[in-house]
């Protein structure tokens, strides 16, 4: 699957990221990781103490990538609405779902404080980042003064994560897109 120009540890991490996204923690066996990465058992245990260590490394990388992608859409000095819209409308593989959000549905990840931490931290970071942008918009008079920045940020994250669920359930991105359009209509700046 991966080029042999990548180091073995990189192939293991990237394979684990993909498999966690597709199958979850329980469905991602060490053997499946090794096969996907084209690496032997000895290589896996040379670089990582075991599946939990490798999974944690993969989850952290996925969380960092999600934050970087979100920040790229949210960054800038433009109107708050435009920045939120850029985040909501950015290209994403809706039918695969969110690689971080899907981990919240994995009982083994949620039950393990260490595996859960990067998931929780990423979603908290996203809500805080969005709340800051919404607050900027409130301070500039872009949004209705009755809105609460933290509640709006939670609604944005919930719309995205819920949109993924609806899209996967229907096998179509239409429900995700409708949720995004509806939220943007609700947030549209005052005239």
Image (tube, rainbow, N blue to C red):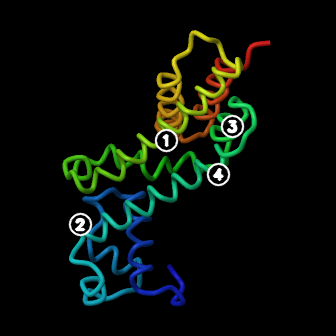
Q: Residues within 10 Å of mark 3 (few under 14, many from 20)?
A: many
Earlier-in-chain disc, 2 versus 4: 2
Picture coordinates of residue 138, whole percent (x, y): 63, 20
- At mark 2, the secondary structure is helix
Tags 4 and 1 in contact by the CB under 8 Å rule? no
Tags 4 and 3 in contact by the CB under 8 Å rule? no
- Residue at 41%, 77% (x, y): give it: 36
Name the mark on residue 52. Answer: 2
Tags 3 and 2 in contact by the CB under 8 Å rule? no
Earlier-in-chain disc, 2 versus 1: 2
Picture coordinates of residue 150, whole percent (x, y): 48, 25
- Residue at 19%, 48% (x, y): give it: 111
Q: Residues within 10 Å of mark 1 (few under 14, many from 20)?
A: many
Residue highlighted by disc 1: 126
Q: Is residue 136 left or right of residue 11?
A: right
The Cα–Cα distance between marks 3 and 2, rounded to whole angstroms, is 36 Å
Residue highlighted by disc 4: 72
The Cα–Cα distance between marks 2 and 4, rounded to whole angstroms, is 30 Å
């Amino acid at each position: 699957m991966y080029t042999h120009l990548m180091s073995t540890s990189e192939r293991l991490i990237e394979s684990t990221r993909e498999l966690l996204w597709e199958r979850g923690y329980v469905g991602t066996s060490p053997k499946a990781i090794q096969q996907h990465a084209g690496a032997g058992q000895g290589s896996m245990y040379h670089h990582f103490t075991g599946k939990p260590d490798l999974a944690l490394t993969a989850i952290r990388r996925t969380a960092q990538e999600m934050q970087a992608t979100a920040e790229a859409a949210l960054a800038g000095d433009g109107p708050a609405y435009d920045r939120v819209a850029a985040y909501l409308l950015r290209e994403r593989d809706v039918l695969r779902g969110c690689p971080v959000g899907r981990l919240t549905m994995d009982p083994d990840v949620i039950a393990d404080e260490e595996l859960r931490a990067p998931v929780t931290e990423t979603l908290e970071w996203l809500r805080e980042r969005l709340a800051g942008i919404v607050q900027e918009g409130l301070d500039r008079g872009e949004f209705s003064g009755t809105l609460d920045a933290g509640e709006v940020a939670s609604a944005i994250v919930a719309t995205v994560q819920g949109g993924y669920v609806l899209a996967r359930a229907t096998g179509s991105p239409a429900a995700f897109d409708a949720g995004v359009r509806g939220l943007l209509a609700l947030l549209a700046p005052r005239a």
